[in-house]
Image: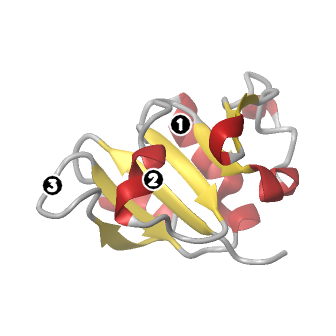
Amino acid sequence: MARYVIVCAFDEPPPDALAGELELADRLRLVRGEERPDLWISWAPFHEVEARLAAALAEGKVGSAAMLPALPPPGERWILTEWRGRLAVHGSIANQLDPRFWASPSRYDLIDLRIFTPSGDMLTV
């Protein structure tokens, strides 16, 4: 599986344990000088953090998340925080998600995004 950029948004800085579980590596600003939301990038292969990310979204530990082929430019970073409690994924890579962890997506066709909600069944996997 190719590597994609995973960005997680938090209302407050993530606890160290959660940052370790999601392999958060780099902090990202939404726009110049803006401190909130607190954005973190994970460069981990998605399949290695997918189940933990779905659980963290479902539990409200992560505000929102996105998996994209590349980091969007500053003017388009709103997509990283738009869908609270859900995962935004570019349509070209949406087939990379494990269907055990995600409910059927909604679509935002203007920029080819699929918006996934953590599956209610994921806690039994």
**Circle 3: residue type:** Glu
Of the numbered discs in the image, which one, if any, rests on residue 57?
1
What residue appears at the point 87 percent right and 40 percent down from the top-left corner? 99
What residue appears at the point 85 percent right and 48 percent down from the top-left corner? 98
Q: Earlier in the sequence, mark 3 or mark 2?
A: 2
| Quadrant of the rendering where the C terminus is positioned | top right
What residue appears at the point 41 percent right and 54 percent down from the top-left corner? 77
* Residue 108 locus on image (x, y percent): 67, 34
* Residue 17 locus on image (x, y percent): 39, 59
**Circle 1: residue type:** Leu
Tell me the colour scheme of the image: secondary structure
What residue is shown with label 2? 8
Of the numbered discs in the image, which one, if any, rests on residue 34?
3
Which of the two discs, 3 and 2, sits closer to the camera? 3
* Disc 2 element: strand
* Disc 3 element: loop
Image position of 9 with respect to 3: above or below: above
In the rendered structure, are the residues bearing label 1 and label 3 in contact, judged by CB atoms less than 8 Å apart? no
Disc 2 packing (10 Å; few <14; some 14–19; many ≥20): many
Q: Which residue is at the front of the view, 92 or 83? A: 92
* Residue 22 locus on image (x, y percent): 52, 61
| Quadrant of the rendering where the N terminus is positioned | bottom right
Image position of 76 with respect to 72: above or below: above
Question: Label 1, label 3: how many angstroms apart (C-alpha)?
Answer: 23 Å
